Each structure stands twice: as C-alpha cells, then as structure tokens.
Image (cartoon, helix red, strand yellow):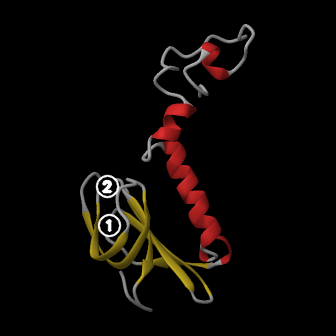
Amino acid sequence: MAWDTGANAGFTTGEPWLPLNPDARERNVARQRQDARSVLNFVRAVLRLRRERCALTTGGYRARPASEGVLAYERAVEADRVVVALNFQGVPVRSGLSGRVLLSTHMDRDGRERDAWLRPFEGVVVAPEAEGGGW
C-alpha cells in the first residue's frame, strides 16, 4: 500500500524499482488515517480493544449456541467477559444478545443494545449485560 500522495507514493526519493499502483493517490495510508471507518483504523481499534480487555488475550474460550450462519463464542477471565458474534450470511440475523457493543466491523455503532441484530457479514464484540445472558 502506498504511504501518501507525494512523489513515488512516499516510498522513496529515488527511482522506485517496482511500478506504483495506479490507484496510489486514492488508496494510501495517509487517506486511511483520515477515514474513521478505514481498514487501518479498524485494525487499530481491534488492537486497542485487545489491550484493554484481558478476556481477549488470556481468557478461556467457550462456543455459544447461535443462529444458522452465525459463529458466536465467549472469552472470559475473572470478571472480564466478552462475546464475539460473526454473521456470515448476506441477511440480517437476530442475535438475542444484549450488552454494550465494544466494536463492530461496520465501525458505526457502540453502546448498549438489547436483542441486537447482526447486519449482513457483520461481526461484533459485546460486553454482555449479565451472567448467562445473551444467546
């Protein structure tokens, strides 16, 4: 991926040894930094959440029952618990999950939800409301 819109897409002040991608002015790290919903910022959000929630690094894993086409699992360690739900279908799916949305692959929602719907091909990380709640 190109770094920026500058000469040689920010790779070198010399002559690049490979040709630059024609879309380097449109697709580059500098643009992704400015777009709150870019892949770069999504990856940063995932890494930040992983650092903040010990359940995502050292927590145990437990599969959760879910609708067809949905993969759901819980990670928990001591008092920290999260549920990850991934909708692999092209249609919305009722999750039955309640809690605080910590991250969505769509990068456009967070906060408390009850009986959240998963949009097509969406994944969420949720801090469930109560022990045994959710799916």
**Point 68% across, 12% down: residue:** 18
Instruction: Tell me how many marks there are.
Output: 2
Task: Name the residue located 36 percent from the left edge and 74 percent from the top edge.
Answer: 66
At numbered mark 1, what does the secondary structure look like: helix, strand or loop?
A: loop
Closer to the camera, 24 or 118? 24
In the image, residue 63 sits, relative to residue 51, either above or below, namely: below
Q: Position of residue 8 (x, y in %)?
A: 63, 14
The C terminus - image quarter = bottom left
Task: Identify residue for label 2.
Answer: 89
Front tag of 1 and 2: 2
Residue at figure coordinates x 54%, y 20% from the top left: 5
Residue 68, x across and y down, in percent? 32, 66
- The answer to whether residue 54 is above or below residue 120 is below
Residue 62 as seen in the image, left or right of residue 87:
right
Looking at this view, name the residue that lies furthest to the bottom: 131
Q: Which residue is mark 1?
A: 68
Asked whether the beta carbons under mark 1 and mark 2 sit within 8 Å of each other, the answer is yes
The mark nearer the N terminus, 1 or 2, is 1
Nearer to me, 78 or 100: 100
Question: Which disc number belongs to residue 55?
Answer: none
- The image position of residue 133, as x and y in percent, is 38, 88
Question: Label 1 to label 2, Cα distance in Å?
Answer: 9 Å
- The secondary element bearing badge 2 is classed as loop
